[in-house]
Amino acid sequence: MKRNAAIFLVVAAILAATGGRVSAITHGTADGNGHPNVGALVAEFGGPEQKELLCTGTLISPTVFLTASHCTIYLESIGVTDVWVTFDSQFSPSSTLHHGVYHTNPAYGHDFAHLNDVAVVVLDSPVAGTTPAQLPQAGLLDQMAVKNGLKGQKFTAVGYGDQERQNGGGPPSFPFDAMRRVATSEFRAINTNWLRLSQNPSTGDGGTCFGDSGGPNFLGSSNVLAAVTVTGDSVCRATNVVFRLDTPASRDFLGDYVTLP
């Protein structure tokens, strides 16, 4: 499935105003059936039946799909109201699609320190046979951070989209095949709303890059969804910056759609 590069450039421009970037998986492996509750956000950009992948997200209840507000605010800006979600391990024209209605966080704004970059898609019908991800308890990451409890902690990023940059034989390129991939990052720093995770391949880490925001960062190998991928360094080489889901800001929004732990 060929992606529409112009779409990602426009979404990236929206993020540029707030210091962010669109994100996907680098230095990872094909996920297969490893994370069946992680899906792709799909919309029609070139007319009816021309559906294309925009972002990634995670099922957090049978009818609620969590993604990033900078994805949905872009859809609002171009007047796109219909969206679909697929949980197929690779998006294609024959993918199984679930229709829904997106809801941008009303607190999403231009203050990078408090960007509130979470959104949801409420699906028309429950997704059967898939266990939703677990949201973290309030303040979980702060509690873990006490006495360096997050030091060495691994996080699992999952997403659809571009892979790591390829050099040689022309301008640098980012391969894309719309396949769900998984990579592991290591904790580096925490603040009120964000985690910074290493995605440096020289230390054995993977992470995120252009093509797929809104994807999950699970705590270790668990089903606990700690944060949403939203930003990082411009060459997709060093740092993945993710928006925490255990904070009052995230919980205030998500509590309108799901029962919080």
Image (tube, rainbow, N blue to C red):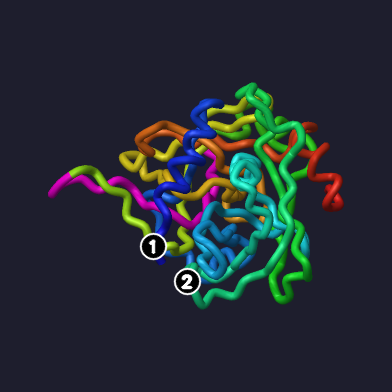
Instruction: Specify whether residue 227 is in view.
Output: no
At x 72%, y 62%, the residue is: 100
Q: Residue at the front extreme?
A: 47
**Is residue 162 inside the magenta stretch?**
yes
Q: Which residues are magenta?
A: 152-170
User: Looking at the picture, how far across and down is residue 10, in whole percent?
Assistant: 48, 40
At x 25%, y 48%, the residue is: 166
At x 65%, y 37%, the residue is: 117
N-term-proximal mark, 2 vs 1 = 1
Residue at the disc numbered 1: 2
User: Looking at the picture, how far across and down is residue 41, in whole percent?
Assistant: 59, 58
State whether the magenta stretch is mostly helix, strand or loop.
loop
Q: Locate residue 87 relative to residue 90 in the image: left or right.
A: right
Q: Residues within 10 Å of mark 2 (few under 14, many from 20)?
A: some
Residue 93 vs 23, above or below: the answer is: below
User: Looking at the picture, how far across and down is residue 242, in whole percent?
Assistant: 57, 37
User: Looking at the picture, how far across and down is residue 24, in whole percent?
Assistant: 46, 49
Q: Amino acid at mark 2?
A: Ser
Q: Are marks 2 and 1 in contact (CB under 8 Å)?
A: no
Q: Secondary structure at mark 2?
A: loop
